[in-house]
Image (spheres, rainbow, N blue to C red):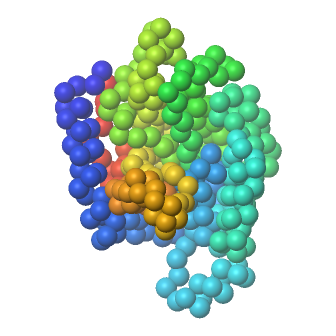
Amino acid sequence: MPTLIDYIFYFIILFSELIINPVRHFFKIGYCKASQRLDGQIAVISDANSSIGKAVAIRLAQSGRFSNSLIKHLKRFFLKIGAKVVLACSDMAQGERTYYEIKWRVANATLALMYLDLSSFKSVRNFSNKMKNQFEKIDILVNCSQVSSSAYIKTEDDFEIHFANNYLSHFLLTMLLLDSLKRSECAKVINITSIHHLLGKMHFDDISLKTNYGSSKAFNQSQLAQVLFTKELAKRCSSVSVFAVDPGFVASYESVSLYKLVANFRLCAALKHCTKTILLRTPFQGAQTIFHCIFDQNTDKHSGKYFRYVIKVIFIYND
């Protein structure tokens, strides 16, 4: 049950977004400074066609920065320097667009596109079986998919959509692939969550909220479940580093031409677009904490912790 301190902490962070975000964007505070080669590693990203999922896929396919621009471009075109990235998508049409966009951005990127519908446990099991048949080990698993719906939606497995998609399927996928992760020398699991977990409560007597549904209540519960799962998995499996990562408030809208909005006298839309650009993080900025947990080896000793803006947050929901 959230305490008064939880609410205070939540609203302090919410308010600070409006003040600190523009400063952070300008001075590039909260960016991942670490870099590491991921040659030969296998990375799986769920919902890879989403804004943050795509940003993570591009970075892992590159897997390293080079100070000399000539060397950078030579290696970019002639060497496979990145991880093999498995793009797990429920919408294969969008997945194909993401696949070819990454291929265009990262020459010689090693990619695989596979179908994964996190609203279906059957799809999760089929996906995990294919992964285990194709790859001996998995080095990085990014549970990236998040849904938010105002309507009450039940999955084919008779669970509420937030709890099923945002937590249960990630839990199932991680546990099914755990043996493959253990075969890696430095396996990492990234569970995407949000600051809303502080307002969450586990309704064990009505886990799908059939009697008293609220979209915020359902979403907050799913975020809390992700955090608690992260902590428990870290306790039970020391050979795999697992992190709960909050990307912050990310603008997930499609690219909009500000010039066209103003030219068509859509001034309110133009103002909204400018406000989002200033106050919200881009997908690449939101993915910085994910990069930090993957590339920085010092994070391994903080397995099970909650990270936000490239720092480990000490305060975390413990009940």
Please report the residue visible at 41 percent of the width from the left and 65 percent of the height from the top.
32
Q: Is residue 308 left or right of residue 173?
A: left
Q: Is residue 313 above or below residue 57?
A: above
| Relative image position of residue 16 (x, y in whole percent) | 23, 50
| Relative image position of residue 115 (x, y in whole percent) | 75, 43
Position of the C terminus, as image quadrant, is top left
For this orientation, the residue located farthest to the front is 265
Res. 10 in view:
yes
Q: Is residue 131 above or below residue 279?
A: above
Q: Is residue 209 above or below residue 168?
A: above
Please report the residue visible at 59 percent of the width from the left and 22 percent of the height from the top.
153
Which quarter of the figure has residue 39? bottom right
Please report the residue visible at 72 percent of the width from the left and 82 percent of the height from the top.
78
The residue nearer to you, when weighing 221 against 138, is 221
The residue nearer to you, when weighing 22 against 236, is 22
| Relative image position of residue 208 (x, y in whole percent) | 52, 16
